[in-house]
Image (cartoon, rainbow, N blue to C red):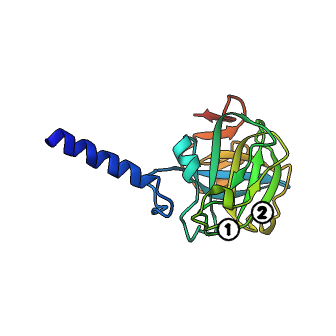
């Protein structure tokens, strides 16, 4: 009797995860890193969460009503994405910008995305397609890139500090760094 009851409760619990309107809060955990965006001879720092697994990428920034001004999320993919592979904003309560990044770490396109807190389903929200190939994407608050003077052609690296800046130019910390280049995800660690 006990195994049958346990099995029934498991089915009910799993089934509730797929119910439309269920809580968008997810137990998915994200690592954080510092992203450096290099542009016009300057480097701008952004604290980012890393979405590299499929569950992390499915959740993304959905269900959040606030994103700190100097924060964002980097989506890293196992293989390059085509120009037709896009993003949607289902269950996302805040407007965002998204930068599509190539295998050399260069921003190839930036799009603004409107919030879409719909509970109906992903198809009830518009899709955002880059029309360029990419290996990673960086989401920030709407207007962040324009406000910092960052545009197409800027280069993105991940880590404590960019290798091309002297330590005295930024806060001290570990020297491990990563950048978008090489490998299928476009992210190569440099220790």
Please tell me the numbered disc located at residue 85: none
Residue position for label 1: 115
19 left or right, relative to 184: left
Q: Residue at x 58, y 54 (%)?
A: 60
Q: Position of residue 86 (x, y in %)?
A: 74, 48
**Real-space Cα distance between discs 2 and 1?**
10 Å
Residue position for label 2: 112
Q: Quadrant of the C terminus?
A: top right
Q: Which residue is drawn at 81% across and 49% down?
A: 130
Find numbered disc 2 in the image and state the secondary structure of the residue it sits on.
strand
Eyeballing the image, is 120 above or below 188?
below
Q: Where is residue 158 in the image (x, y as percent from the top left)?
A: 64, 45
How many residues crowd mark 1 within 10 Å: few (<14), some (14–19), many (20+)?
Answer: some
Work out whether residue 121 or residue 162 is closer to the camera in this orientation and state it. 121
Work out whether residue 72 or residue 78 is closer to the camera in this orientation and state it. 78
Find numbered disc 1 in the image and state the secondary structure of the residue it sits on.
loop
Residue 139 is drawn in which quadrant? bottom right
Residue 70 is drawn in which quadrant? bottom right
Eyeballing the image, is 64 above or below 134?
below
- Residue 43 appears anywhere in the view: no
Work out whether residue 37 or residue 171 is closer to the camera in this orientation and state it. 37
């Amino acid at each position: 009797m006990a195994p049958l009851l346990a099995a029934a409760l498991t089915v009910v619990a799993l089934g509730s995860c797929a119910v439309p309107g269920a809580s968008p809060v997810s137990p998915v955990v994200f690592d954080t890193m510092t992203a450096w965006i290099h542009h016009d001879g300057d480097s701008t720092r952004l604290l980012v969460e890393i979405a590299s697994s499929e569950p992390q990428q499915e959740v993304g920034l959905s269900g959040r009503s606030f994103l700190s001004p100097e924060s964002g999320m980097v989506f890293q993919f196992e293989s390059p994405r085509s120009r037709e592979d896009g993003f949607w904003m289902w269950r996302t309560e805040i407007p965002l910008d998204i930068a599509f990044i190539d295998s050399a770490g260069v921003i190839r396109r930036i799009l603004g995305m409107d919030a879409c807190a719909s509970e109906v389903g992903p198809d009830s929200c518009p899709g955002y397609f880059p029309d360029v190939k990419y290996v990673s994407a960086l989401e920030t608050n709407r207007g962040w890139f324009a406000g910092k003077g960052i545009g197409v052609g800027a280069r993105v690296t991940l880590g404590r500090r960019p290798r091309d800046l002297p330590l005295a130019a930024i806060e001290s910390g570990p020297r491990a760094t990563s950048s978008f280049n090489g490998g299928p995800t476009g992210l190569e660690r440099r220790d």
